[in-house]
Image: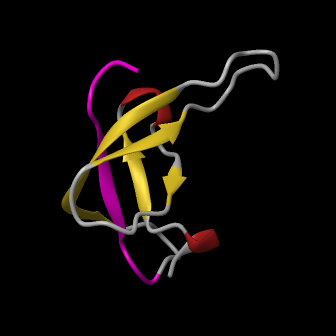
Amino acid sequence: MTLSGCNAICLGGPCHGVLAHVDQDIGILDVPVPRGRPDEPERRAGYRITRERVRYWGQAEPYIALHWAGPP
C-alpha cells in the first residue's frame, strides 16, 4: 500500500491532488472537498474510478487515477 493507506489520487476538479482509498474497481467515489476556511460548509465531489495508474516519486505502487465526474 502507498502513503497513509491511500491507493488513489484525484485528478482535476475541486479535489485535484487529494489522496483517497479505493476498494472497488468501477464506479464513482464521493470525495470530501478540502475546505478553504473552517467555517465553510462540507462539500463532496464525484470522481470516476479508472484503470489508469499514476506513478509518484518515492512510492513503490502507482495510484489509481480518479477523474473528476463533473460539477460538485
Q: Please name the residue shown 31% across and 66% down the image.
A: 24
Left or right: where does residue 28 sit relative to residue 43?
left
Residue 34 x, y percent position in the rendering: 62, 32
Residue 21 x, y percent position in the rendering: 48, 63
Left or right: where does residue 27 sit relative to residue 60?
left
Number of numbered labels in the structure image: 0
Coloration mode: secondary structure
Left or right: where does residue 71 sit relative to residue 35?
left
The answer to whether residue 52 is above or below residue 31 is below
Q: Give the quadrant of residue 25.
A: bottom left
The answer to whether residue 60 is above or below residue 6 is below
Q: Please name the residue shown 56% across and 31% down the image.
A: 33
Q: Please name the residue shown 49% across and 77% down the image.
A: 59
Residue 67 x, y percent position in the rendering: 28, 42
The answer to whether residue 33 is above or below residue 38 is below
Quadrant holding the C terminus: top left
Whether residue 64 appears in magenta in the rendering, the answer is: yes
Residue 58 x, y percent position in the rendering: 53, 76
Whether residue 27 appears in magenta in the rendering, the answer is: no
Q: Which residues are magenta?
A: 60-72
Q: Please name the residue shown 36% across and 73% down the image.
A: 62
| In front of the other: 64 or 57 | 64
